[in-house]
Amino acid sequence: MTRAASPENIAAFAQWIPLLGSVEDGIVESFENGGGVPYSAFPRFHEVMAEESAQTVVAALTDHILPLVPGLTKRLEAGIDVLDVGCGSGRALNLLAHKFPDSRFTGYDFSEEAIARARAEAGEHEAKNVRFEVKDVTVLDEKERYDLITTFDAVHDQAKPAAVLEGIADALKDDGVYLMQDIAGSSHHHNNLEHPIGPLLYTVSTMHCMTVSLAQDGEGLGAMWGEEKAKEMLAEAGFTKVEVKQLPHDIFNNYFIITKG
């Protein structure tokens, strides 16, 4: 019944219902006239997103998500370079920085508000091995720099998701790993008819993920871009090996383990 019950407490996720309802008029107008509703129109977006991330990602990160990649925890303990693309308020990255002091962590997000939150949390922990930067992640302009790159529920919101994935492929070392968490579902509507939370996911996609991308003249990919489309775009970006894994407690997400070869 309270936030202390994380990750079992559904109240944090339920905050999306009034938040999305507050932009209903803008969504309807966009359907009628084109365009989209920008991030700035969503009240408390980064606060709510951080609380949801704390439940779905942060709470499971070290004990469940990292072990999906064989040997990754030991590499982090030894010390590697890590980038989180679309890091939001930085809770996942700050946790990793605290847990693995010999590794070096970088977080990029285009939101100044989110980066301010991330830096504030890092400052509270006096973390010296993590940095956060306001950056347009469609233009990473880095070459084979990182051993691990992560995106948590971030790619499908992008205005130019293909460019983001191509930049990640370029920035990843040849022996590096890209760990992508994204919504579990098919790219084809008829395959999602029996999805236990399909209607909810399509609602969130329509009223947030698609529209914030369209507001930037983007592709409007949406949360339900699906596993098939994700694999297609990853291949086009230059990745040759993609494994899709799931966690027993998490019906929301797929975890893509991605390498160049």
Image: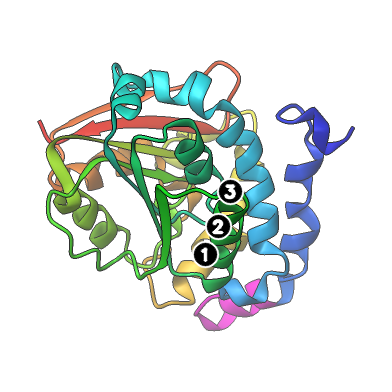
Q: Residue at x 72, y 69 (%)?
A: 43
Q: Is residue 127 left or right of residue 173?
A: right
**Sequence-wise first label, 2 or 3:** 2
Indicate which disc, 1 or 3, sits on the residue closer to the N terminus: 1
Q: Secondary structure at mark 2?
A: helix
Q: Main secondary structure of the magenta part?
A: helix
Q: Position of residue 136 (x, y in %)?
A: 35, 70
Looking at the rendered structure, which numbered label has been put on residue 118? 2
Please, what is the three-letter code of the amino acid marked with disc 1?
Ile
Could you say which quadrant of the image residue 148 lies in?
Answer: top left
Category of crowding for the residue at label 2, using alpha-carbon neighbours closer than 10 angstroms: few (below 14), some (14–19), many (at least 20): many
What secondary structure is marked by label 1?
helix
Front-lying residue, 204 or 130? 130
Q: Quadrant of the N terminus?
A: top right
Residue type (three-letter) at the residue carrying disc 2? Ala
Q: In this rendering, would 72 be left or right of 46?
A: left
Residues under numbered marks 1 and 2 in contact, where contact means CB atoms less than 8 Å apart: yes
Q: Is residue 159 visible?
A: yes
Residue topped by disc 3: 202
Label at residue 115? 1
Of the two numbered discs 1 and 3 in the rendering, the one whose residue sits closer to the viewer: 1
Q: Nearer the viewer, residue 11 or 76?
A: 76
At which x and y percent is residue 86?
43, 56
- Check disc 3 and give the amino acid type: Tyr
